[in-house]
Image (tube, rainbow, N blue to C red):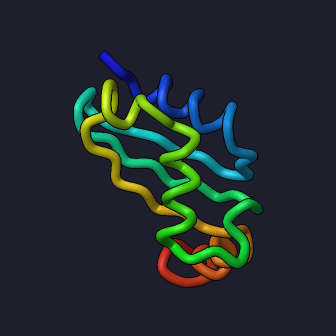
Amino acid sequence: MTTPEAIHGYIARGLPCSHLEVDGDGQHFRAVIVSEKFAGLSRVRQHQLVYQVLGDRMREEIHALSLQTYAPDAWAAEAGGARG
């Protein structure tokens, strides 16, 4: 069974992150990812980068993954607003 810790490791090894949280119950997972690689990209393209890092695991191990992706400036703006 895939764990949040395993998904955290997969993402951390494949994408430079300044913030990374992953939680879940073994079937459904949620990830919050902040990466400079997301700067200037649409939300769709940001998610595609994460899926690319996870590769075949998205079909074989991970059945449901909710993503919240942010470039550092968007994360900082979010922190000053709703999360602050």
Q: Position of residue 15 (x, y in %)?
A: 69, 44
Residue 17, percent from left and from top: 71, 49
Measured as percent of width and height from the top left, residue 77 is found at: 65, 81
How many tags in the picture?
Answer: 0
Task: Name the residue rendered at 49%, 36% in the picture.
Answer: 55
Q: Of residues 55 and 68, which is closer to you in this image?
A: 55
- The quarter of the rendered structure image containing the C terminus is bottom right
Q: Nearer the viewer, residue 16 or 18?
A: 16
Image quadrant in which you'd find residue 11: top right
Looking at the rendering, in which quadrant would you find the N terminus?
top left
Residue 29 in percent (x, y) is at: 33, 41
Q: Residue at x 33, y 25 (%)?
A: 61
Residue 3 lies, with reference to residue 74, above or below; the image says above
Identified at 51% across, 72% down, the residue is 43
Q: Is residue 12 above or below residue 50?
A: above
Q: Which one is in front, 50 or 21?
A: 50
Q: Residue at x 54, y 33 (%)?
A: 8
Find the residue positioned furthest to the top: 1
Up/down of 8 relative to 33, above or below: above
Left or right of residue 78, residue 30 in this image: left
